[in-house]
Amino acid sequence: MKKDKPLINRVANSGIITINLEDYYPTESLLVFDLTEYLFRGLILREKDFREALAVHNWEQYRNKNLSVCCSSDAIVPIWAFQLVTIHAEPYANNIIFGDEKDFLAAYYYKTLQALNLEQFKDKRIVIKGCGEKPVPVSAYAELARLLCPVAKKIMYGEPCSMVPLFKKK
């Protein structure tokens, strides 16, 4: 009878670093400020009425939240209107992005990934984890790969048991 050898987790012992972009997913709620609600007859933004509405709007509701500012209708809205909303919300909201929820996530991830300390990945073998539960934008995966190329030894995508090679430093 053979003596049973202990199981060895070769993936854990490989020195591969797994980066899960879901770990960077925003934890604060996302609220949407849609300028469509402020259009006269659904078509026109009247400056005086809009300024009055913003003056009485409850900005406190955005405290410690993320805010997406958009106009979901096909109306032509002047650029200053989006700026005015941003200026009003700025003291309250954590992050303010122009666009819908998808645009928000793309911009949020871009900003978050720019703040990463890339030195921790210098000459390391990296797996960018895929197949998650949260809607991480494809642009975040592409941006992370771009940022890692100058520092990482090897970049792969997927799960440690099933990786797709993407990059290898020469």
Image (cartoon, rainbow, N blue to C red):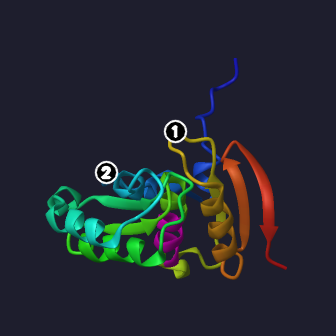
**Does 155 appear above or below 136?**
below
For the image, the number of numbered tags is 2
Q: Which of the two residues, 52 or 127, is positioned nearer the viewer here?
A: 52
Give the residue pinned by disc 1: 133
**Does 113 appear above or below 67?**
below
Give the residue pinned by disc 2: 29
Q: Which of the two residues, 26 or 120, is positioned nearer the viewer here?
A: 26
Residue at 55 percent across and 62 percent down: it is 106
From the top left corner, tell me how far across and down residue 21 is, in percent: 53, 56
The quadrant of the picture occupied by the N terminus is top right
Residue at 23 percent across and 59 percent down: it is 62
From the top left corner, tell me how far across and down residue 110 is, in percent: 54, 70
Any magenta on residue 108? yes
Indicate the quadrant where residue 35 lies.
bottom left
The quadrant of the picture occupied by the C terminus is bottom right
- Viewer can see residue 10: yes
Mark 1 secondary-structure assignment: loop
Magenta stretch prevailing secondary structure: helix
Q: Which residues, given as a range, are shown in magenta? A: 107-114
**Kind of residue sitting beneath label 2:** Ser
